[in-house]
Image: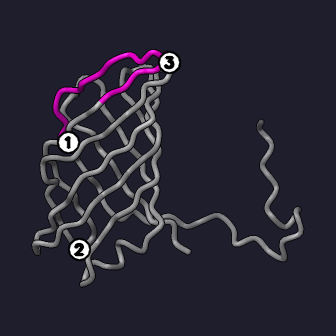
Amino acid sequence: MSAECPDMTTLGAPLSPGQPRLTRVCSIRAEIGPATEFDTSRGTGRALFPITGGEAVGADWRAKILPGGADFARRLADGTYEVEARYFLELEDGTILMVHNAGRMVPQADGSFHGRTRAELEVPAGPHAALGDMVLFGTALAPAGDDGNVFIELWHAEI
C-alpha cells in the first residue's frame, strides 16, 4: 500500500478540492484520575478515565477544564483504545463550552499512546460561536510514565 490514492477526478468529479489545510485551534492538557477497567465477555475491555481538570489554550483564549467529564474507552485485542471523551471548558470570560472528542489511541514501543481523533465543540451564541462551526481533528499523547495527563491538539480542517 505505498501507492498514492488517486483523487476524485478519476471517478468523474470535475475537480478535487485538494488536501485540507489544517490550522491548530488549541492545545489541551487534560488531567485524568485513576481508570476503572474491566474485561468484557466479548474479549474486549472497557475503561472509564475520569477527567478531573486541566487547561486549554487557543490563539486568543484560555480555559480551564471543569471536573466531571470522562473518557469512555474500549480496549481492543491489539492494545489500542477506542476513546470517546466529553467534558466542559470554562473560558476566561466565563463562557462554558462542551468538548466531544472521539478516536483511537495506539500503544507505542516506549509505553506511551498516540492518538488521532475527530472533535466537536458545542458553543453558545456569542463571541466564541465560530468554534462550534469548525470541522476539527485531533492529535493526542498519553506520555509513558504519566498516568495523570493526556495532551491534545485540535486542528481545524478549513473548508
Could you tell whether 116 is left or right of 10 in the image? left
Give the residue at mark 3. Answer: 42
On whether residue 46 falls in the magenta region, the answer is: yes
Name the kind of residue labelled 2 in the image. Asp
Q: Which of 18 and 98 lies nearest the eye of the viewer?
A: 98
- Label 1: few (<14), some or many (≥20) within 10 Å? many
Give the residue at mark 2. Answer: 60
Q: Secondary structure at mark 3?
A: loop
Q: Secondary structure at mark 1?
A: strand
Q: Which of 110 and 16 lies nearest the eye of the viewer?
A: 16
Q: Which mark is in front, 3 or 1?
A: 3
Q: Choose top left, top right, bottom left or bottom right for residue 62.
A: bottom left
Q: Mark 3 and mark 1: span between their CA atoms?
A: 27 Å
Name the kind of residue labelled 1 in the image. Ile
**Image quadrant containing the N terminus:** top right
Give the residue at mark 1. Answer: 51
Name the kind of residue labelled 3 in the image. Arg
| Residue 135 place in picture, x, y as percent | 48, 66
Stretch of the chain drawn in magenta:
30-47
Mark 2 or 1, nearer chain start = 1
Q: Are marks 3 and 1 in contact (CB under 8 Å)?
A: no
